[in-house]
Image (tube, grey):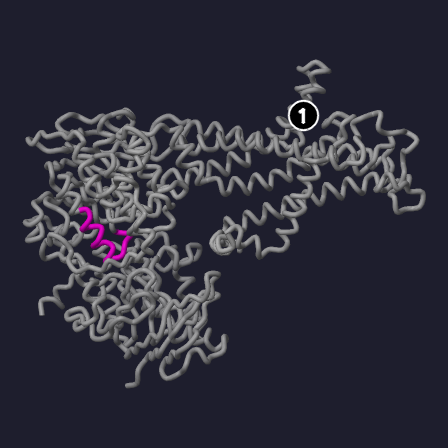
Amino acid sequence: MLTWWRRVRIENELIYLFLRSPVTQVAAAIGLLSVLGALFAPLIAPTNPYDLASFDLLDSFLPPAWVEDGDPRFFIGTDDQGRDLLSSILYGARLSLLVGLSSVAFAAVLGTGLGLAAGYFGGRLDTIVMRIADVQLSLPAILTALLVDGVARGILPREQHDELLLVVLTVAIGLSLWVNFARTARASTFVERNKEYVQAAEIMGLHPLRIMAVAILPNILGPLMVIGTVDLAVAILLEATLSFLGVGVPPNQPSLGTLIRIGTEYIFSGEWWIVIFPSAALIVMIVSVNIMGDFFRAVLNPRLR
Amino acid sequence: MGALLEVTDLTVQYPTRFGLFTAIEGINLSLEPGQIHGLVGESGAGKSTIGAAIIGLIPSPGYVAQGDIKLLGQSLPELSQKAYHKLRGAKISMIFQDPQTSLNPLLTIEDQLVETIRQHSGHSYQEARDKAVALLIETGLENAQGRMSEYPHQFSGGMRQRVVIALALCTDPDLIIADEPTTALDVAIQAQILDLIRRLANDRGVGFLLITHDIGVIAEITDSVSVLRGGKLMEEGKTAQVLGHPRHDYTKALMAAVPRLEEKLDRFANILSDEPSLPTPELLWKVDGASDQFATDWLLAGERHTASDGPVLSVRDLDVTFYTDRQFSLGKGTAVRALQGISLDVQPGQVLGVIGESGSGKSTLAKAIVGLVRPSAGRIEFNGSELPLGRERARTHPSRRKIQMVFQDPYSSLNNRRKIEDIIGEPIRFFDLARDKGEQRRIVASVLDLVGMPQRAMLKFPHQFSGGQRQRIAIARALVARPEFLICDEPTSALDVSIQAQILNLLKDLQAQFGLSILFISHNLAVVRQMSDHVVVLKSGKLMESKNSDDFFAGPGDAYSRRLLAETPSLDLLLGA
């Protein structure tokens, strides 16, 4: 077992470099902590911020526990409605990560599929897909997201919209991110497509779908993983922005963006903790995800090392 | 006159994460002015590292661990970085393999030559320019005055290499290190460049250190030679003596592996089996019931077309024209005629060699036959029935199984993300050749055995194998489809000579055993000589000559073929003695 680990440590590029990059290790630890915190929020959070009965308006605007007037029940204070901030942040991070991951997954599937097909078949399909991508790229991500959200609000009845809010949000953010995946997948597919192993499969007469899925896809996953990690940070940020603007998650389920919006209203009246702590949580999360993205990029592109 | 270059006991090491790696060890060599000394060896022999060590540009983190390099009596490793830098420009120059990348594509050659000359001398611009023109004329560039203001891409490969040589001569160096200077060039141009190097050595008294893997080049122009293997010096001496009467076993094996033009051998004998030896447990690993005998029986059990009359493959008046891509526009782009009116026949059980330089359309011919490229005119018949062309050939067409292909580059012809078992198993699965998973496994293991690989290889990924081993795997993949016709597109041009000999032996054995008909494409006449029964020569998409192999090599009828044959470097000079 120990010798196995020793061998893996040296032979596996990813692990070898990871063990030599303390910054990435810290980032990965924070990332893991965020995921665990989000995953087990119902177990570790002191209160349930979604349960209206669990908080009291009398507790509102309490500062962190270590400050004068602080209440030991609320470690980093409470917001305008008396919700425990720590619990809100844990639940908020849960929501942010959920939306972030699912919208990246949505964008990855859509973008990779289209990019792979465009790169493999080329010609007219390629031109059409890439022109759509160009149009998409010229729209700011926020605008796309607002547009999708607005359309969804128009089509869906109000109750259903609230239920489907997370799905709408996922699609809205995913739609503004798929272009990255499509472009990368297309460019890599172009390179792989002319390699002889693909020609060998074509000569045999394998179905194009099988060639794309079994032969090409595994070979272009590397750069897509980098895009995925970097885009995860972007997606979390987008969700926070939308929630900050009030078009994101429902107000009774605060995400990090919602908390920051609430906080900004009180920043000048002295209740700094309401905006500082959710913002700090968001920043730390995004920076660590970005560092991991950079690490993946460096591993996959030896020239950057 | 004292020695120009004196290398003693040179050792270069690289610290890696797997421990200290010794790239070259205890190398000695010396060079007189006006001499050409060859460094020959296969990949990983450390030839380029020696060149880099002399010029002081060993890529980090490598370093000279031991030994000394003296240029005109001056010890180089003792110099400061600054002094080294000065000396590097003034006394030592380098010529690289690829003329495409060793010139700056954004500057005219005038800018590049004049700048280099003025860097190292006090010449005025006009003086430097005159010198540059003189150098270009000396290296044999026509209309040198007029072409000074052109950019590198406006020159052909051979002309570009002349410019690179002129660039190397700018500072009147005493020593020029040429690292594979002709490897990227066609034979005709290679011969011209080698002539030029010889002439410069004689006229200017420049010492050349010529690094190459090609024994033919060594035999052609060097005075003395060092044979390297795995970073160690195997044998050293006068070229005629080392190559003519090799003393070391490795040199003997190397010489035996070089394909000859003069006669066709049944097999290459006495060649090295230098695949790294595997630990015994690796070799003992077996799939139940798998053996090379099983593979032979299984491959022979396949149904086989036995029409002995007429050719297996017959191509008539084949034209291939490529159009440049223009989307959403009417009409076609500019046309390039890659093949024009090609007709050829491959007789059952015979090997047809296709000879051609780069751009002659030989790969296009292979692609047209397998249906990757759509011919614009002509017919292809396989076993007497016409093959649909290009995309019209259905994916389920029986010829998809019967015609298989082995590619040039073993590094890109295997999918790096799949296990060998899956790679070789794919044709079996797709053509439905095995009854169940177990049989498929047994076939894969047996065929690996047949091509000389340990059965355990099936559990690994392609990147764990060397080029030669990968090519064996690629051949195994082509074999399991039970083909009747095999197309080999430059199957050995990416491999070292000793590995090339092994692969050629393997192909010959398989051909004899299974009666395969083969279309063997290569630019290397000696390799084609060893493999073919019949030969065709392509030039710029046209068929120049089609002849029986023995007759062809005895005396080609076409002028182009004769020139091609004459310019191929050969060992005659040495071996005649």
Q: Secondary structure at mark 1?
A: helix
Q: Is residue A106 magenta?
A: no
Q: Residue at x 21, y 60 (%)?
A: B191
Image quarter where the C terminus of chain B lies is: bottom left
The x, y position of residue B312, in whole percent, is: 13, 33
Q: What's drawn in magenta, residue-wise?
A: B493-507
Q: Quadrant of residue B173?
A: bottom left
Residue B4 picture quarter: bottom left
Task: Tell me the residue at 39%/79% (across/down).
Answer: B68
- Label 1, on which residue? A166
> Residue B306's spot in the image, x, y percent?
10, 30
Query: Which residue shows up at 6% across the image and 52% down it?
Result: B555
Asked if residue B211 is positioned above or below residue B434 in the image, the reply reads below
Mark 1 is on which residue type? Leu
Task: Tell me the residue at 30%/34% (across/down).
Answer: B440
Q: What crowding class fits label 1: few (fewer than 14 Cα within 10 Å), some (14-19), or many (20 or more)? A: some
